[in-house]
Amino acid sequence: MEQQVGLARGYTRSHRLYELGGIILGVSAGGALALRLSSTENLSGWWVPLALFLGLLGADLTSGLVHWACDTWGSLRTPVLGKLAIRTFREHHVDPMAITRHDFVETNGHNIALSVLPSLVGLCRLEHRTLASTVVAMSLLSMALFVGLTSQIHKWAHQTEPPMVVRWLQDARLILAPRHHDEHHVAPYDRNYCITTGWLNGPLRAVRFFETAERLISRFTRAKPRCPASD
Ligand SMILES: [Zn+2]
Ligand SMILES: [Zn+2]
């Protein structure tokens, strides 16, 4: 309980300001990319659903990589990232239901801030006026959208009574399903890191992606994965 309170107290005023700034930047960058795309020629064709699907996969992979990195490496004392990101993930393991009590800004600030990156890359790609650039930019817009939605989707997976349409999307496995995500919340928290749709958890486990990455990082840095949440 003490640890839970300590971790929750790490949510400071400056952290909230960072989240508010991230939301403004994320929505602006995503909006600018959508606007630029809408004025592009050849904005239709067989490639549109494929580009949107690839963006969704990109968001699921990003959620897995970020989640794995913050669960596995560093501690609350890690410069910048300790307070900015790692604390949130460690709090989530100590008190998984805390996320359901977070308001819109605390739930989504981080991820909407992160969505700035694919949106900016998409805007840069549109400088080249080719069909390939439009396809890539469309994928990046989809990726930005779903990266921005990931924390909300994760929150829904923890809610006992999410909205009906959300329950339907979860049951259809179109977004992260609670039962699938529950497997992550078992110590040592080393399964099912992807939390947008969870589609990539099976393939990544099959190729032992995270285990291999951990072995390589430990070999070269001598860092030990998964230090205690209190660190
Ligand atoms: Zn986790
Ligand atoms: Zn969770």
Image (cartoon, grey):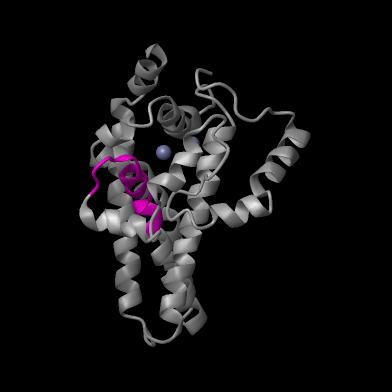
Would residue 126 be visible to someone looking at this image?
A: no
Left or right of residue 183: residue 206:
right
Q: Is residue 57 magenta?
A: no
Looking at the image, is 191 positioned above or below residue 37?
A: above
Q: What secondary structure is the stretch in magenta mostly built from?
A: helix
The outermost residue toward the top is: 2
Q: Nearer the viewer, residue 126 or 185?
A: 185
The outermost residue toward the right is: 219
Quadrant in which the N terminus appears? top left
Q: Is residue 152 magenta?
A: yes
Task: Report how many numbered discs are placed on residues in the image.
Answer: 0
Looking at the image, is 202 positioned above or below residue 91?
A: below
Looking at the image, is 196 positioned above or below residue 49?
A: above
Q: Nearer the viewer, residue 36 or 71?
A: 71
- Give the residue at x 49% y 62%: 57
Would residue 165 be visible to someone looking at this image?
A: yes
Q: Give the image location of residue 46, x and y in percent.
A: 44, 85
Q: Give the image location of residue 149, x and y in percent.
A: 34, 53
- Give the residue at x 24% y 58%: 165
Q: Nearer the viewer, residue 30 or 201?
A: 201
Left or right of residue 205: residue 231:
left
Q: Quadrant of residue 206?
A: bottom right
Q: Give the image location of residue 34, x and y in percent.
A: 32, 69
**Residue bounds of the magenta highlight:** 146-162
Left or right of residue 8: residue 197:
right
Q: Give the image location of residue 43, x and y in percent.
A: 37, 83
